[in-house]
Amino acid sequence: MGVAVNALFRRLAVPPVAVFATMATCAVCLAALFAAGEGGMPGVAQPDALVYHRYALSMREGAFYAFNPGDAATTGCTSHVWLWLSAVAALPFGSFRAVVLAQTLFGAVLFAATVGLGWTLARRVAPQGAVLGAALIALSGQTAFTAFSQVDMALYVPAALGFACAAAFASRRWMPILAAALPWVRPEGALLPVLLAIVFLAPGAGKSALRKPAALSAIVAVASLLLVFAFNRLVTGRWQFDSIAGAKATDGLPLPGTVETMVSGLLSTWETGLLGISTGGLFLLLPPVVGVLGAMAFVVRRDHDVERRRLAWWLGLAALATMALGAAGGYSSQASYRLIAWTIPVLLVFFAGCVGGICAAYPNVPRLFVAAPLILWQIATVAYYGLRLHEGSVQVESRIAFVREATEALPPGARVGMKGATGFVVAANGLAATNIVSYTSADFDLDGCTSCALEVLKREPGTRFDAWLLYEPDSAMLIAARTSGDTIAVQRPDFGPANAFTLFHTDWTMLDAGLEPVGASALRALRDRTLAERLDVGYPPDERRLNYRIDQAEPDVRIQPFGMSGHVEGIEMLETGRTVTGTERFEVPVDPKKPLVVVVRAAVTAPVQVYEGRGGWSGSIDMPFESAVVSISIDGNPAGAISLSRNGTDHFTEKAFTIPVQMLTSTPARFEVSGNHHSLAWWFYQ
């Protein structure tokens, strides 16, 4: 028996300690998931996985890339390959639980593949610590957490390591193949081949067997990434992934703020993940301090193998770039660290190589004495992340059970509105879901502006839904609070009200007020006039059609769009608006032969969020412009000024003015409105 086991290990070419550690880690993760599931099936640890499950089940029904059968196609998932694999898993049984089971077992295979690829990489990049490197990866709780999370990074980690192995051994066959595949697994996969080419083709890099395959791989990766965007365009009409658009932490920031946010997030990643400075469990991400210094020492050590040293620099540079992308995406504080997950095995290989170098330099020091702290640390990560898998599954499964029971009160064919956690509709008795932050709903192409969803729901009644399903904190946001009807059910889980759900009917009456001008003076000016064009500020189709833009007086100032309720002559309404401290510009198609009557609705004060540099976005700040006077020009010619001051106790004001036909020299007429004001809506009559 022992001979057969040894022969098996030799065939696998993986150290026995890594095989047994992999089996033990998988057992912990599987136990954590199965214990939290229902009906003898594993649980789901991350809500994002449910989005893939829902797409997969819809695709099984013939709805190609549609989150709900019958909806327009969207790319609410950031990995085409993982979605296709999820759809294949759904084919045999068409059951949500069957997909969960298939992806859980697939996760075990992917984790084992990660360990094997880590061992292969270590043999080339850190041969003195290859066995230890494989063992550390096999005992990496965070890496296992990613593999069993049922999201795309489970596949991306071994795919990225596979390319690293192909590059390490200068495989001319596998390098371009994997370079072509990586962007389809995750779009940032193109980064690895491009950085490899930069390192090995840089001036002074000298001759290398990797120069030509690295250059070819970079070209193939970029071409593949362009094909991914072209595929998105073909499927949805949009180049970008819907799951990414508007979801970045740096969206809307000036250049200094973007750089500052990325650097701050990157430092946060190093502090919590690598230096161990954390109030939570993030310090278990990697061995702290000593491990960091060891990794750095390994990268810059005096190695006689020039090729190996370049590979180490490439891997270190790629890890740093990946962490920077994670920081830009706003993931630097997430415990799972999904976006940097592939770097964890690489850094563990570095640590192991450093230990091997120390033992080689000081042969009298017992290897186990140096390696033991790292091994014990990794064992602790298995326990910690195994517990996180279980706790996450308990929470997700509790919410799934609530959604299933609560939505039974809704009629068949009802649609549920959500702000996040849209994947939970997979348990909602076949109901459809609308996500007002656009990831899975094509009607809400808002570029990250949640407040703008108000205008979409106002202007497009077909986008409205029958019930809200929201986390309790989100149920207090303006659009939900002012459109909520009677409460259907409220979840009160043991793990805290912040994670609870509220399901309540919708009442859209409030949205139908103020669709047109309502002020008496404005209505008098519109007699015998026909509406020619309108601009609801914050409504994306209007803003795109009229080329709407704002030039703030201070270029580095960024102010978020706002939503608020207000009155015009006693009539209450809901509006989305934008704050202007400089000039707002738009272009209006007109008939140059007729005078133009313009009605503007503005807010005299508004609750806004302002970007404050190092402090990030402020909370809601009341910004009054109660005596605002704005100047207007048409096609660069002054057209007068109007006062947008408060009328009585109204929060909003409406003013009408006429542009004489002599000023309408061409179409479209280019409007420039200068002066501090909160712009809500414009109507144009002829």
Image (tube, helix red, strand yellow):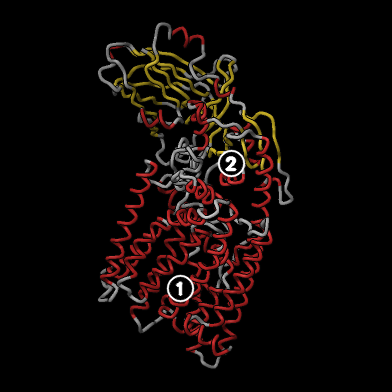
Q: Is residue 271 visible?
A: no
Q: Dot 2, crowdedness within 10 Å: few (<14), some or many (≥20)?
A: some
Q: Amino acid at mark 1?
A: Leu
Which quadrant of the figure has residue 321?
bottom left
Please state the horizontal and vertical placement of residue 115, each as a whole percent of the image: 50, 73
**Above or below, comparing residue 649 to residue 98 in the picture:** above
Side (left or right) of 313 relative to 32: left
**Above or below, comparing residue 32 to residue 647 in the picture:** below
Q: Amino acid at mark 2?
A: Gly
Residue bearing mark 1: 117
Q: Which mark is residue 157?
A: none
Q: Quadrant of the C terminus?
A: top left
Q: Observer-nearest residue: 346 or 621? A: 346
Marks 1,2: beta carbons within 8 A: no
Residue bearing mark 2: 430
Please state the horizontal and vertical placement of residue 61, each as a whole percent of the image: 49, 45
Please state the horizontal and vertical placement of residue 641, each as a whole percent of the image: 40, 18
Q: Dot 1, crowdedness within 10 Å: few (<14), some or many (≥20)?
A: many
Side (left or right) of 234 relative to 392: left
Q: Is residue 595 visible?
A: yes
Q: Which circle's residue, 1 or 2, is located before the other in the chain?
A: 1
What residue do we see at 36% from left, 65% from top?
Answer: 178
Q: Quadrant of the N terminus?
A: bottom right
